[in-house]
Amino acid sequence: MHFSIPDTEDIKEGSTSYTIYNIYVNGVFHCKARYKQLRQFHDELKKEYGAFALPEFPKKKLLALSSDEVEQRRIMLERYIQLVSQDHQIGSSNLFNGFLLMAQQESQKEEAEEDSLDVFLMNGHKITVNLMSTDQTEDVLEVVAQQIEIPDDYVYYFGLYLVKKEEDGDTSVVRKLQEFESPCLSLKAANKHAVHRIVLRKAYWDSSFDEDLLEHKVTLNLLYVQVHSDIERQWVLATKDQLSHLANLRKKNSKRE
């Protein structure tokens, strides 16, 4: 997961002026934050983990910053959030996830309201779930899993992914949605620049876990759909013999083999 702060915005509200830092995740806009919000976030992390566990945070200045100083602060803040996110203990904490989730909601001026969300499989099958617009990723995943009857033990073998539709009609996986975001809000932000959808895919790389999914008809079908789709898109390379074997299995409706 790559965080960046590629640019800033100068905001003027009456007699007050301040700078907004735009935070992106894997090249996709996530939220806006002021220096004082990031400073408060840093102070909370320092209370929880201690100063020595954290990278250097840019110091507060009493006078207005010049354009060069704003740029230097942007670089330091970007480096700070990159290093913090790479610390597994901090990056998976409620403090980290909560700050970014709240910042996303505030950036989009989103109030929690009843909503629906379309989640797709790789073969285009649509699953529509009812939720609150600000529900975070884990909650949405659990609702989807319940609706299609994934056993509780296997829910977190899967994840929700942001997928972009390319100009040539093909699709590309942008990234896995994380706990610090709301899928509804992330999809809304991404769709301002291109057509995206949210897709359910397996969330692991170790193929030995496939054996667990083969034991249940729902997870077996999900695994089959993904493998078949990935081979068709050439995201997974297969030999002629493997492709022929897969075609024969489809004819026999035999997925487990």
Image: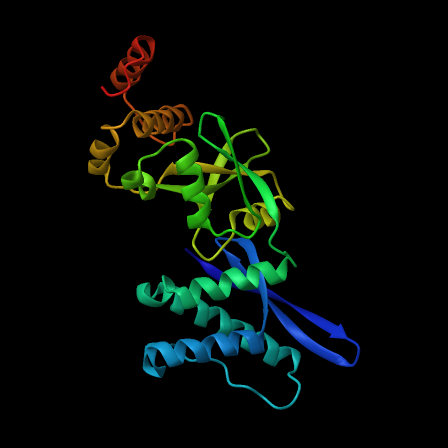
Q: Is residue 164 above or below residue 43?
A: above
Say whether residue 170 is left or right of residue 85.
right
Q: Is residue 118 above or below residue 27?
A: above
Q: Residue at x 39, y 81 (%)?
A: 47
Image x and y of residue 234, in percent: 39, 28
- Nearest to the observer: residue 226 or residue 92: 92
Q: Is residue 24 above or below residue 73?
A: above
Can the viewer see residue 27 in this picture?
yes
How many numbered marks does the figure carry? 0
Q: Quadrant of residue 254?
A: top left
Q: Quadrant of residue 208?
A: top left
Q: Residue at x 46, y 36 (%)?
A: 199
Image x and y of residue 63, in percent: 65, 90
Q: Is residue 218 above or below residue 174?
A: above
Q: Residue at x 44, y 72 (%)?
A: 80
Say whether residue 177 is left or right of residue 34.
left
Q: Residue furthest right?
A: 14
Image x and y of residue 251, in percent: 33, 8
- Nearest to the observer: residue 85 or residue 108: 108
Instruction: Give the quarter of the figure containing the C terminus.
Output: top left
Can the viewer see residue 82 in this picture?
no
